[in-house]
Image (cartoon, rainbow, N blue to C red):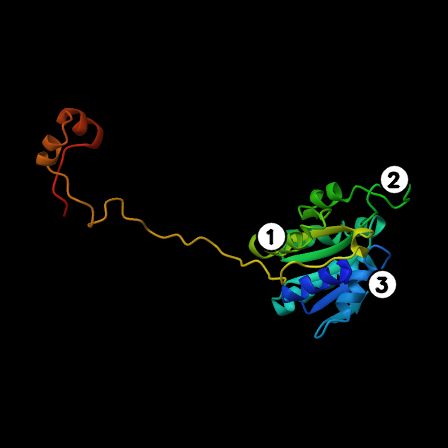
Amino acid sequence: MPKLYEALAEAFLAEGVDTQFVLMGDGNMHWCTAFAKLPGVHTVHVRHEHATVAAATAYNVATGKIAVASVTCGPGVTQLMTALPAAVRARLPMVVFAGESPINAKFYNQNIDQAPLVTATGARYIAAHSVPRMMDHVREAFHIAKVERCPVVLGVPYDLQKVEYMPTSPTRPRRCTSPRSGACSPIPRSWPRPSSGWLRQSGRSSSVAVACCGPARAMP
């Protein structure tokens, strides 16, 4: 049975991602390795976590494609605090796959509350702690990045990444839809035209109707 990190890699591929900028650590090594093995994926290894987001920013500006970076948990995430605000102010669509410390492992010496640090930069943070909803977390991250045009950090505890996972349905990206708006005529010509006869037939006081709706008049 495949591992969850393999399903997560497939989910990123389904979103159309073909390039990742990575500094590998224990919190993201399984995912980024599985993603690198998928067909058509190009992996760029950098030497500092800051450079993962900085390089992904340049990639988005050059190609127009959604950018993907990846860092490990704890201190790996704290190193993003310089590059993330720049991406936020530039309104760049980006998803950062970040490891999180193991759930309920308070002894883990790199255990840091990552969400407040990320949200302080203006970026969004999604704590992906539910295995059954894991693919929903991925779709939500990409949807927010594309629609709201902002960086999203997806934090996945690395002990969860190694559990066995069998998807119940094929991974499909969430469609990005925007409501269409336009001019709306307040009184369409297809509506019935008011008349004094209609007021009399309604059984209500014409004075009340006139007071509420105004005097009846022919439409142009």
Q: How many numbered marks have been drawn onto this rendered protein structure?
A: 3
In 3D space, how far apart are the residues under numbered discs 1 and 2 (Cα atoms)? 31 Å
User: Which element is circle 2 on?
Assistant: loop
Mark 2, other Cα within 10 Å: few <14 / some 14–19 / many ≥20: few
Residue annotated with mark 3: 47
Residue annotated with mark 2: 106
**Is residue 121 or residue 7 the one in the foreground?**
7
Disc 1 versus disc 3: nearer the observer:
1
Q: Disc 3 marks which amino acid?
A: Arg
Residue annotated with mark 1: 144
**Is residue 84 or residue 135 the one in the foreground?**
135
* Residue at the image position 60 percent from the left and 66 percent from the top: 64
User: Which element is circle 3 on?
Assistant: loop
Mark 1, other Cα within 10 Å: few <14 / some 14–19 / many ≥20: some
- Quadrant of residue 91 within the rendered picture: bottom right
Question: Sequence-wise, which precedes: disc 1 or disc 2?
Answer: 2
Disc 1 versus disc 2: nearer the observer:
2
* Image x and y of residue 217, in percent: 12, 39
Indicate whether 206 appears above or below 153. above
Disc 2 versus disc 3: nearer the observer:
2
Left or right of 87: which side holds 206? left
In 3D space, how far apart are the residues under numbered discs 1 and 3 (Cα atoms)? 28 Å
* Residue at the image position 21 percent from the left and 32 percent from the top: 213
**Is residue 82 or residue 93 the one in the foreground?**
93
Whether residue 23 can be seen here: no
Whether residue 137 can be seen here: yes
* Residue at the image position 20 percent from the left and 50 percent from the top: 190
